[in-house]
Amino acid sequence: MPETQLQIPDAVSAELDHLELTVEGPNGSVTRRLWYPDVSVTVESGEVVITSESDDAIPMQVTIEDGEVVISNFLGERADRRTAIHGNTDVEIDGELLTLRGPDIEAVGQTAADIEQLTRVTDKDIRVFQDGAYITNKPTRGDA
Protein backbone atom coordinates (compact mmCIF):
# COMPACT_ATOMS: atom_id res chain seq x y z
CA MET A 1 0.00 0.00 0.00
CA PRO A 2 1.70 3.24 -1.09
CA GLU A 3 1.53 6.10 1.37
CA THR A 4 2.24 9.81 1.01
CA GLN A 5 2.83 12.07 4.01
CA LEU A 6 2.55 15.85 3.71
CA GLN A 7 4.12 17.96 6.47
CA ILE A 8 1.91 20.76 7.76
CA PRO A 9 3.82 24.01 8.52
CA ASP A 10 3.58 25.50 12.05
CA ALA A 11 1.30 28.40 11.03
CA VAL A 12 -1.13 26.05 9.24
CA SER A 13 -3.73 23.67 10.64
CA ALA A 14 -5.61 20.83 8.94
CA GLU A 15 -8.84 19.14 9.99
CA LEU A 16 -10.60 16.20 8.41
CA ASP A 17 -14.37 15.92 8.87
CA HIS A 18 -15.54 12.73 7.16
CA LEU A 19 -14.49 13.46 3.55
CA GLU A 20 -13.95 17.23 3.90
CA LEU A 21 -10.36 18.40 4.44
CA THR A 22 -10.08 21.98 5.73
CA VAL A 23 -6.67 23.67 5.73
CA GLU A 24 -6.39 27.02 7.54
CA GLY A 25 -3.41 29.33 7.48
CA PRO A 26 -2.37 33.00 7.55
CA ASN A 27 -3.70 33.57 4.02
CA GLY A 28 -7.15 32.07 4.67
CA SER A 29 -8.74 28.65 4.56
CA VAL A 30 -9.50 26.09 1.87
CA THR A 31 -11.95 23.19 2.09
CA ARG A 32 -11.93 20.30 -0.35
CA ARG A 33 -14.08 17.20 -0.54
CA LEU A 34 -11.65 14.30 -0.92
CA TRP A 35 -13.43 11.31 -2.35
CA TYR A 36 -11.37 8.96 -4.43
CA PRO A 37 -11.90 5.23 -4.85
CA ASP A 38 -9.36 3.11 -2.90
CA VAL A 39 -7.75 6.17 -1.26
CA SER A 40 -7.94 7.13 2.40
CA VAL A 41 -6.91 10.51 3.85
CA THR A 42 -6.10 11.07 7.55
CA VAL A 43 -4.61 13.90 9.61
CA GLU A 44 -2.07 12.64 12.16
CA SER A 45 0.18 14.75 14.41
CA GLY A 46 0.89 17.58 12.00
CA GLU A 47 0.78 15.50 8.81
CA VAL A 48 -1.80 14.76 6.16
CA VAL A 49 -1.42 11.05 5.31
CA ILE A 50 -2.76 9.80 1.96
CA THR A 51 -2.89 6.01 1.58
CA SER A 52 -3.81 4.14 -1.59
CA GLU A 53 -5.34 0.69 -1.26
CA SER A 54 -3.71 -0.61 -4.44
CA ASP A 55 -0.39 0.27 -6.07
CA ASP A 56 -1.52 -0.48 -9.60
CA ALA A 57 -4.69 -2.09 -10.83
CA ILE A 58 -2.70 -4.14 -13.34
CA PRO A 59 1.03 -4.08 -12.62
CA MET A 60 3.36 -4.82 -15.52
CA GLN A 61 6.59 -6.77 -15.14
CA VAL A 62 9.82 -6.01 -17.00
CA THR A 63 12.52 -8.66 -17.45
CA ILE A 64 15.57 -9.28 -19.63
CA GLU A 65 15.61 -12.55 -21.63
CA ASP A 66 18.10 -13.56 -24.34
CA GLY A 67 19.08 -10.04 -25.38
CA GLU A 68 15.50 -8.75 -25.30
CA VAL A 69 13.47 -6.56 -22.97
CA VAL A 70 10.26 -8.43 -22.16
CA ILE A 71 7.22 -6.59 -20.79
CA SER A 72 4.54 -8.85 -19.33
CA ASN A 73 1.00 -8.04 -18.24
CA PHE A 74 0.98 -4.59 -19.86
CA LEU A 75 -2.60 -3.27 -19.51
CA GLY A 76 -3.63 -6.81 -18.58
CA GLU A 77 -2.57 -8.29 -21.90
CA ARG A 78 -1.73 -12.00 -21.90
CA ALA A 79 0.88 -11.80 -24.66
CA ASP A 80 4.33 -10.50 -23.77
CA ARG A 81 5.73 -7.47 -25.56
CA ARG A 82 9.37 -7.86 -26.66
CA THR A 83 12.03 -5.63 -28.16
CA ALA A 84 15.70 -6.26 -28.94
CA ILE A 85 18.56 -4.68 -26.99
CA HIS A 86 20.76 -2.95 -29.57
CA GLY A 87 24.57 -3.15 -29.60
CA ASN A 88 26.44 -3.44 -26.29
CA THR A 89 23.71 -1.71 -24.29
CA ASP A 90 23.44 -2.78 -20.64
CA VAL A 91 19.89 -2.68 -19.22
CA GLU A 92 19.52 -2.61 -15.43
CA ILE A 93 16.15 -3.03 -13.72
CA ASP A 94 15.79 -1.56 -10.22
CA GLY A 95 12.15 -1.72 -9.14
CA GLU A 96 10.29 0.65 -11.47
CA LEU A 97 13.47 2.21 -12.88
CA LEU A 98 15.20 1.00 -16.05
CA THR A 99 18.74 2.29 -16.59
CA LEU A 100 20.42 1.90 -19.97
CA ARG A 101 24.18 2.30 -20.40
CA GLY A 102 26.60 1.58 -23.19
CA PRO A 103 29.51 2.83 -25.28
CA ASP A 104 27.39 3.57 -28.37
CA ILE A 105 24.96 6.43 -27.69
CA GLU A 106 22.95 5.58 -30.83
CA ALA A 107 22.41 1.96 -29.72
CA VAL A 108 21.44 3.08 -26.19
CA GLY A 109 19.08 5.73 -27.58
CA GLN A 110 17.49 3.28 -30.03
CA THR A 111 16.96 0.70 -27.28
CA ALA A 112 15.34 3.36 -25.06
CA ALA A 113 13.11 4.55 -27.91
CA ASP A 114 12.08 0.97 -28.74
CA ILE A 115 11.12 0.31 -25.10
CA GLU A 116 9.11 3.55 -24.97
CA GLN A 117 7.31 2.73 -28.24
CA LEU A 118 6.68 -0.84 -27.07
CA THR A 119 4.43 0.48 -24.29
CA ARG A 120 2.73 3.22 -26.29
CA VAL A 121 -0.96 3.47 -25.39
CA THR A 122 -3.36 4.13 -28.26
CA ASP A 123 -7.12 4.70 -28.25
CA LYS A 124 -7.11 5.55 -24.54
CA ASP A 125 -6.85 8.81 -22.62
CA ILE A 126 -3.19 8.93 -21.53
CA ARG A 127 -4.11 11.23 -18.64
CA VAL A 128 -6.03 8.29 -17.15
CA PHE A 129 -4.05 5.32 -18.51
CA GLN A 130 -0.53 6.36 -17.49
CA ASP A 131 0.88 2.86 -17.83
CA GLY A 132 4.01 2.45 -19.89
CA ALA A 133 7.72 3.15 -19.98
CA TYR A 134 8.78 6.77 -20.43
CA ILE A 135 12.19 8.37 -20.96
CA THR A 136 12.54 10.68 -17.97
CA ASN A 137 16.25 11.50 -17.91
CA LYS A 138 18.71 11.81 -20.78
CA PRO A 139 22.47 12.24 -20.37
CA THR A 140 24.02 15.57 -21.20
CA ARG A 141 27.23 15.96 -23.16
CA GLY A 142 30.02 14.20 -21.28
CA ASP A 143 27.68 12.11 -19.09
CA ALA A 144 27.21 9.25 -21.56
Image (spheres, rainbow, N blue to C red):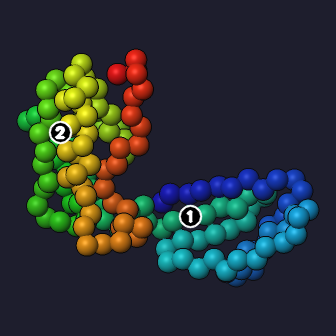
Quarter assignment of residue 113: top left
The picture places residue 125, in percent across and down from the top left corner, at 35, 72
- In space, the residues marked 1 and 2 are separated at their CA atoms by 32 Å
Q: Is residue 90 visible from the viewing direction of this image? A: no
The picture places residue 36, in percent across and down from the top left corner, at 54, 77
In front: 37, or 123? Answer: 123
As drawn, 38 above or below 98: below
- The residue indicated by pointer 1 is 51
Residue kind at label 1, given as amino acid type: Thr
Q: From the viewer's perspective, is 138 left or right of 27?
A: left
Residue kind at label 2, given as amino acid type: Ile
As drawn, 45 above or below 41: above
- The residue indicated by pointer 2 is 64
Q: Callout 2: 10 Å neighbours few (<14), some, many (20+)?
A: some
As drawn, 84 above or below 106: below
In front: 68, or 108? Answer: 108
For marks 1 and 2 on the same chain, the one whose residue lies earlier in the sequence: 1
Res. 117 mark? none
The picture places residue 27, in percent across and down from the top left corner, at 88, 64
Count how many numbered circles sit on residues in the image: 2
Q: From the viewer's perspective, is 27 left or right of 32?
A: right
Tell me which residue sits at (70%, 77%) in the image.
32
As drawn, 127 above or below 82: below
Q: Is residue 125 visible from the viewing direction of this image? A: yes
Q: Callout 1: 10 Å neighbours few (<14), some, many (20+)?
A: some
